[in-house]
Image (spheres, grey):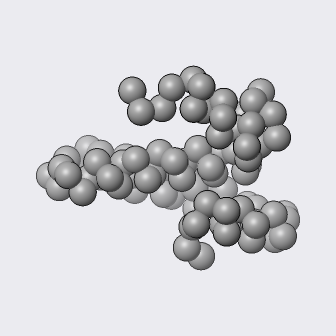
């Protein structure tokens, strides 16, 4: 499995502050970004996997919603996060 409990805990510790802080917007965006990158690599090898393609589109939409929320509430954290994760604006 590409995303085990330890990897999730590491992502939330790095971006959410603590491992237990799974509800933080920054942590969720980082987790979605990790999953999006993984699915993108999968689709490069399996172009006809349409179920995965749909899942990828849904994840990108969820991440976009959270990023829009961050823009409204804290533009400075938003800019830092997209720079760290390498997300296009």
Instruction: Give the total number of marks visible in the rendering.
Output: 0
Instruction: Tell me where residue 2 appears, x and y as whole percent.
Output: 41, 33
Residue at far left of view: 48
Position of 31 with respect to 45 (left or right) is right
Q: Nearer the viewer, residue 52 or 12?
A: 12
- Residue at (76% x, 66% y) in the render: 80
Q: Nearer the viewer, residue 63 or 16?
A: 16
Instruction: Tell me where residue 54 appears, x and y as whole percent.
Output: 32, 50
Position of 18 with respect to 57 (left or right) is right
Q: Where is the N terminus found, in terms of image quarters?
A: top left
Position of 34 with respect to 39 (left or right) is right
Instruction: Tell me where residue 65 appears, x and y as whole percent.
Output: 62, 59
Q: From where the camera sits, is residue 54 visible? A: no
Instruction: Tell me where residue 30 appears, x and y as whole percent.
Output: 62, 49
- Residue at (66% x, 30% y) in the render: 9
Up the image or down, 25 lies above or below 1; here it is below
Q: In terms of image quadrants, where is residue 21?
A: top right
Q: In terms of image quadrants, where is residue 28?
A: top right
Residue at far top of view: 5
Q: From where the camera sits, is residue 61 visible? A: yes
- Residue at (66% x, 56% y) in the render: 66
């Amino acid at each position: 499995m590409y995303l085990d409990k330890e990897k999730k805990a590491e992502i939330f510790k790095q971006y959410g502050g603590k491992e237990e802080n799974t509800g933080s917007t920054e942590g969720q965006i980082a987790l979605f970004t990790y999953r999006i990158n993984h699915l993108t690599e999968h689709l490069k090898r399996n172009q006809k996997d349409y179920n995965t393609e749909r899942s990828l589109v849904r994840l990108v939409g969820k991440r976009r919603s959270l990023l829009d929320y961050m823009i409204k509430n804290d533009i400075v954290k938003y800019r830092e996060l997209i720079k760290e994760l390498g997300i296009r604006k």
